[in-house]
Amino acid sequence: MAGLYIHIPFCTHACPYCDFSFELLRDGRVGRLLAALEAEAERRGREPPWPDTVVDTVFLGGGTPTCLTDRQLDRVFRMIHDSFRVDPDAEITVEANPETVRTSKLRRLRALGVNRLSIGVQSFSDEILRRLGRRHTADQAVRAIVLAREAGFENVNLDLMFGVPGQAALDWADTLERAVSLDPEHVSVYGLTVEPGTEFDRMEKEGLLGLPDEARHVACYYQALDRLSTAGYRHYEVSNLSKPGFACRHNVSSWNGGDYLGLGPSAHSHVAGRRLANTRGLADYLSAMDARGEAIDMDETLTVDERIHEYILLRLRSVEGMDTGVFRDRFGDDAMGKRDPAIHTLAEEGLLAERGSRICLTRKGLALADSVCAYLM
Ligand code: SF4
């Protein structure tokens, strides 16, 4: 079993904080992207291990996949089924932005086998959405969720964002309440980070952004965990909570080291210990596909140290934590022993807890997950 990720890089507008690989929607380029994706899927689908592999999760991410027309979406799914063996019970997720959601499109997605919709809500405050440079309103976000239910989606994720300039505790509390009242199966909560080269980065350097301080940022994160846990959501990864049985199978599999194939600009793959990445920008991806019939610009077999780092990062971000016995079996006593002093220090500082053979991030550690993992590298 393995996952398939397809990157649709088009958006109807540019959000000032975004550093994903995306392009403003232009019709001519969609056709070229789809032709290139078809060629890539056909080629990859013929290479081992894909002819003998059943794909049990498919994820259309972006960008904004729902800005494609119905016909274009039909073409994407035809391509998937022509080139890969998809399990009849596969989890098939499509990312959507509220302003692109229509009843007809949702019905088409359901007919194409899509059974999980991930909606980029971010906030239920129009003022916060405006500050984030989003195109949709809070009402449109609610409507998108209602329409998704009417179209038959029984597995809906909402992406929510905290740490936004000007976001008061009350705004965030209200967003969490409204999210809970809409009863999604899954919620992802992300803190805003200012990425180099973005419009927010420029504003921050000019002192125009007004980000909340670290303490406020962390308080918003805990507020989300507490409110959502009280409402019955299980916290299973640093940024992800779900109702029982609704953890995102695609992400959980990749966090557990499962294989996945990524198609499209900037898409990454992990196949039998190899990491591959496609060229990032759409123009470069299209040129590479035209010239070489493939767009891979990074292909590496991970060293033991890289595999250890990746394992620590992925396992510790999971709320279950890392089983030190499994770590020892995989990487040896020396690799574990080398980390014992750091584990001890982190435990003393209240960032890690030891539970039997497992080490897990504490509540304090969850808010500093990246730093804790880096310390153990
Ligand atoms: S809609 Fe998403 S991918 Fe597109 S620009 Fe905004 S944040 Fe980036």
Image (spheres, rainbow, N blue to C red):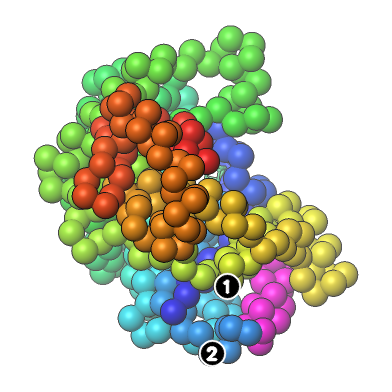
The three-letter code of the residue at mark 1 reads Ala
- The residue identified by callout 2 is 52
Q: Is residue 130 left or right of residue 142?
A: right
Does 130 sit above or below residue 181?
Answer: above
- Element type at mark 1: loop
Q: Please give the name of the residue rendered at 31% of the width and 45% of the height, measured from the top-left corner.
A: 359
Gap in Å between the C-alphas at discs 1 and 2? Answer: 14 Å
Q: Quadrant of ligand 1?
A: top right
Mark 1 residue's CB less than 8 Å from ligand 1: no
Q: Position of residue 204 (x, y in %)?
A: 59, 17
Residue 310 appears anywhere in the view: no
| Mark sitting on residue 272 | 1
The three-letter code of the residue at mark 2 reads Asp
Q: Please give the name of the residue rendered at 48% of the width and 13% of the height, measured from the top-left corner.
A: 210
First to last magenta residue range: 31-47
Q: Quadrant of the N terminus?
A: bottom left
User: Disc 1 vs disc 2: which is toward the camera?
Assistant: 1
Q: Please give the name of the residue rendered at 29% of the width and 59% of the height, measured from the top-left corner.
A: 247
Q: Look at the magenta stretch and give its main secondary structure.
A: helix
